[in-house]
């Protein structure tokens, strides 16, 4: 599996400074909360597991967008969202790797049409929700 992009590359090539927008951050957080509530209500089976995995990734990705925005930054790719998280919180290397793996799973679902096994979501659901709580705490 490809490694998480180096933060220095992100900073030089994919990040721009923006004004902090607390209203937008609040709106993103609210949408993520709604999406999480809906995602948690889905019965996970081998047909729905892909959708659930995509939804967990979307929630985490949007919270990372809000986190960058809180820091006056905007990224033009998903890799740098994860890279920034790892850069700011090296003690959460494991969580950054979980998000990176989830991004790769989501990309395979979206671009290759693969179906995620129910076991994958069930085995990682608590990790995904832990990361969501962590990111919410940083916001």
Image (tube, rainbow, N blue to C red):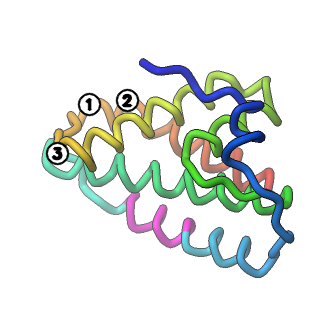
In the current view of this chain or complex, which residue is farthest to the bottom?
23
- Where does label 1 land, which residue? 119
- Real-space Cα separation, disc 1 to disc 3, in angstroms: 18 Å
- Nearest-to-viewer mark from 3 and 2: 3
Q: Earlier in the sequence, mark 3 or mark 2?
A: 3
Whether 131 is among the magenta residues is no
Tell me the crowding category of disc 1: few under 14, some 14 to 19, or many 20 or more residues within 10 angstroms, Cα based.
Answer: few
What is the CA distance from the residue labelled 3 to the residue labelled 2? 21 Å
Vertical position of residue 57 compared to residue 119: above or below:
below
Quadrant in which the N terminus appears: top left
Q: Residues within 10 Å of mark 2 (few under 14, many from 20)?
A: few
The secondary structure making up most of the magenta span is helix
- Point out residue 108 in the picture as x, y percentages from the top left corner: 28, 39
What mark, if any, has residue 123 been given in the picture?
2
Q: Which residues are magenta?
A: 32-40
Check the image and report above or below for 19 versus 56.
Answer: below
Location of residue 42 by image quarter: bottom left
């Amino acid at each position: 599996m490809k490694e998480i992009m180096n933060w220095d590359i992100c900073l030089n090539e994919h990040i721009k400074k923006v004004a902090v927008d607390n209203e937008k951050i609040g709106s993103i957080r609210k949408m993520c909360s709604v999406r999480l509530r809906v995602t948690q209500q889905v019965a996970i089976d081998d047909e729905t597991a892909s959708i659930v995995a995509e939804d967990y990734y979307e929630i985490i990705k949007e919270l990372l967008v809000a986190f960058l925005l809180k820091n006056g930054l905007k990224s033009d790719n998903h890799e740098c969202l994860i890279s920034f998280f790892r850069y700011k919180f090296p003690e959460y290397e494991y969580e950054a790797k979980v998000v990176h793996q989830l991004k790769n799973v989501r990309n395979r679902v979206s671009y290759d049409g693969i179906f995620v096994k129910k076991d994958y979501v069930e085995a990682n659901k608590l990790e995904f929700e832990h990361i969501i709580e962590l990111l919410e705490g940083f916001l």
